[in-house]
Image (cartoon, rainbow, N blue to C red):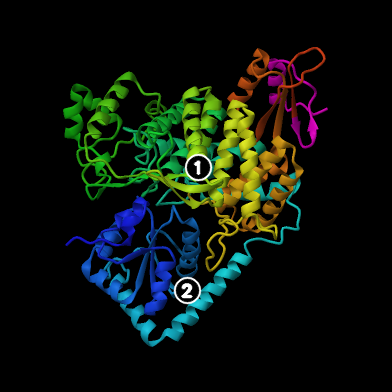
Amino acid sequence: MSYINRLVHEKSPYLLQHAHNPVDWYPWGEEAFDRAKALDRPIFLSIGYNTCHWCHVMARESFEDEEVAAYLNDHYISIKVDREERPDVDHVYMTVCQMLTGSGGWPLSVIMTPDKKPFWAGTYLPKKSKFGLPGFLDVLRVLAEAWSEERGVLIEQAEKITAALRLSADESGVSGEIAAPGATESDPILDLAFRRFHSAFDEEHGGFGGAPKFPSPHNLMFLLQYWKRSGERRAFEMVDTTLKNAYAGGIYDHIGFGFFRYSTDSRWMVPHFEKMLYDNALMMMAFTDMAQATQKSFYREVVWEIASFLDREMKSPEGAFYTAIDAESEGEEGKFYVWTQDEVKDLLGKEGEAFIKAYGITEQGNFRRRSIPHLIVSDKNGGWEAALPPRSPAKERCRKRLLAARDERVRPHTDDKILTSLNGLAAAALARASRAFSDPDYLDMARASMDFVLENMVKDGELHARYRHGHVAHKAYLDDYAFLIWALLEMHQTTLEKSYLERAERFGREMVDKFWDQEGKGFFLTAKGAEELIVRPKETYDGAVPSGNSVAVTDLLRLSHLLEDEALGELADQAISAMLPHLKTNPMAHAHLLSALDYHAGGAQDIRITGQKDDPVVQAMVSYVRRLYLPNAQIVLDDETDDEEGRPRLVICRRFACSAPIYTVDELQVALMTGRPAT
């Protein structure tokens, strides 16, 4: 039987996936809440996203099931939410789930009163009890009966949960009146963070903790920054080991490039096969940083591979980037990406044996009797470095042949919505790579993404969060502003074009006006005047991506230096001081904020150049600086004046003092290598 519900009118690919469920879904909105009040029913809220594997599983087991749908339709008002379009709703109710169960994830399932107050929350549930989980239908029946017969208990529970949620939001930071720590006070916090990461480090395989294992590139970027600050060699080795092992494993797509979401084992062998724009953008940044720190071609090669994947599979015709690629095709996770020995031999002929050996394509397979290509080798002394890129011409020829054959398979679904936040993240990564490697192709990709966002995501003077098929929706959240400013600042540093800095300043001041907590506790996720939820959410946790607060603080610090605007720096001070309790109690959950703290506490380096941008000496100085790993350095170009002799000059400013003028690259090299004292 064919069904249709209200989601058919939505633009979200995730909501459209459920438009033909027998469940009578509503999108989030007043129509649903009014209907729940009129019928005196509780609300079932389901939150997920387009490429979420367990969302697909629960949909097949329950939301496409007529028995479950009939019960939901008779006893509940059912609401579907795309977490990537409504991160505010997701944040509020995910916090509830974590409070009630101690964990979270998607699909997120919540049952609440018609006035949005939750009294039950969980994640994936099978239709009938299995895996030690209660059956979804049983939960629905028990709570519907309780709503009918013991409503007072549920209302009391909902009020207590809501009160606890509001209290948690009120305690999201200290007053903000305490000054942010300086260099001396920051050192113990950064040292503590390093020790925590070190204690959780997997010495054999890299990464932190056991399975499932995430690369968490912003953790690695902090550790590399800590190495640069402290000289702690172990921090560098943790980054090096993790990036090499993650790349060598099956979590990396060795045929089509790009990283999958995470590894289901501790060796990085078997991934969860989603590909996310944000993971690949952040990994590109981490590999770029290591390429600068080591000057090794391997890291630069991986950056090129990730960019190639983004260009081929995640770029829209207009130059913006899509959100994600599903793990499943033909109803089976990973089917698109795995191989048998016979398939490889048939495609590669006599070269097949060498490829099979190099990439671990075995007869028994390592995933459902098929093989995930990988470069994990037992002999890490002899074969390890030889297994890593750059590839030989023969390997590259074989890879392209397999890629062409793979492209003939049924492809996983692409979530083709365009998000301002994630395009900011991708453009920031590409601009940084372009700067580090003097590669104009990366810059062209970043420009196209930013041009699309600036031309299409601003409507009636307001920045918006999502674009799909010509339709713009949802006024921008903090992450949209913070990540867009990040990209504009990276574009400015790469091009030294003032227009990018001017746009970054404009959006930075808008961000403060719309999202700043007047109590000095950082930034809210939603803007002033946005839809009122049961609590105004605020995110400080650096999870799969850095939090909007962490990035916003970094943006303000960088803008305050580039614009010489102390007021912006003072706001960053307040935000950092408000979030210090989080840094001290759980530093590993705030890696990007730790990087901001390092910048704030004396790490900032302003490299001020006076001269014309096209002057050969200026170009040589800029080129030299960009090759180096200087995570806290920013170039400030003054092309309106030069010294009395008409020569370009450079000064390095740090901690309110500047070096003597530098006139040549040789002098600059000495100054950066020796840390010549400022005069």
Residue 505 percent across, percent down from the top left? 65, 40
Give the amino acid at mark 2.
Asp
- Number of the label disc, if any, that sits on residue 618: none
C-alpha separation, residue under disc 2 versus residue under disc 1: 39 Å
Please report the residue visible at 56 percent of the width from the left and 61 percent of the height from the top.
537
| Residue 223 shows in the view | no
Which label sits in the foreground, 2 or 1? 2
- In front: 185, or 414? 414
Alpha-carbon neighbours of circle 1 within 10 Å: few (<14), some, or many (≥20)? many
Circle 1 sits in a helix, a strand or a loop, which is it? helix
The residue that mark 1 highlights is 217
State which quadrant residue 178 falls in: bottom right
Is residue 137 covered in magenta?
Answer: no
Please count the marks in the image.
Answer: 2
The residue that mark 2 highlights is 115
Residue 110 percent across, percent down from the top left? 41, 68
What segment is highlighted magenta in the picture?
Answer: 653-679
